[in-house]
Image (tube, helix red, strand yellow):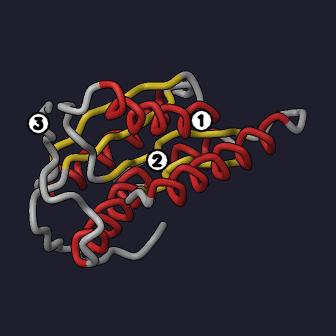
Amino acid sequence: MEPQREPPSYQFETKPHVLIVESRFYADIADQLLKGATAELDRAGASHEVLTVPGAFEIPAGIMYAIKTLDFDPARKRYDGYVALGCVLEGETKHDEIVGRESARGLQDVILRYALAAGNGILTCATREQALERADPARMNRGGAAAEAALRMIEIKQRLRLSPKKRWIARG
């Protein structure tokens, strides 16, 4: 168990709007990750939406789809940040290694390509017990930590003026 610390405080120019992209492959673990992430976003005053994808491997594509929707609907509300939540458990083959590595690589690729503020809450664990310990908001709270990382990156983007002034773009 990790030591208790003071909850972070945030300083935003405008309250952020965040997209949580979650995998529900392990629903009980996903519930705990989502609970921790939404609690942190709510505490920070951020609005949020949830997009559910089949598995951890699909999380980067879900984020990419959200970005690309602006190409087709420019009046759509932009997201200031993204939280990736999922779980990959070790199995008898190397499938878990591939999914874990490629979901992390895909997430990093989309973050760097579009200069996104994001937090990675994709757990890669040997056992279900390890995953539940990490997902539980009362224990390791990795969902909350991923949301905190996204919020910190939003703060940095705002400070460096990397965010659009308006999240709503009028149709021309």
Task: Identify the residue under disc 2.
Answer: 135
- The percent position of residue 93, horizontal first and vertical second, equals 90, 34
Q: Using the numbered discs, state the Cα–Cα distance from disc 1 to disc 3 in whole angstroms.
A: 34 Å
- The percent position of residue 106, horizontal first and vertical second, equals 63, 46
Task: Identify the residue under disc 1.
Answer: 56
Task: Identify the residue under disc 3.
Answer: 170
Q: Residues within 10 Å of mark 3 (few under 14, many from 20)?
A: few
Q: Dot 2 lies on which element?
A: helix
Q: Residues within 10 Å of mark 2 (few under 14, many from 20)?
A: many
Name the residue: 34% across, 55% down: 147
Is mark 1 in CB contact (under 8 Å) with mark 3? no
Q: Dot 1 lies on which element?
A: helix
Rendered position, 152 above or below 35: below
Of labels 2 and 1, the one closer to you? 1
Residue 15, quarter of picture: bottom left
Q: Which mark is residue 72?
A: none
Identity, as a three-letter code, of the amino acid under mark 1: Ala
Of labels 1 and 3, the one closer to you? 3
Rendered position, 162 above or below 60: below
- For residue 7, say whether it is visible: no
Q: Residue furthest right?
A: 93
Q: Would residue 11 appear left or right of 123 to someone viewing this image? A: left
- The percent position of residue 63, horizontal first and vertical second, equals 45, 38
Please report whichever mark, 2 or 1, sits nearer to the chain's N-terminal start: 1
Identity, as a three-letter code, of the amino acid under mark 2: Ala
Identity, as a three-letter code, of the amino acid under mark 3: Ala
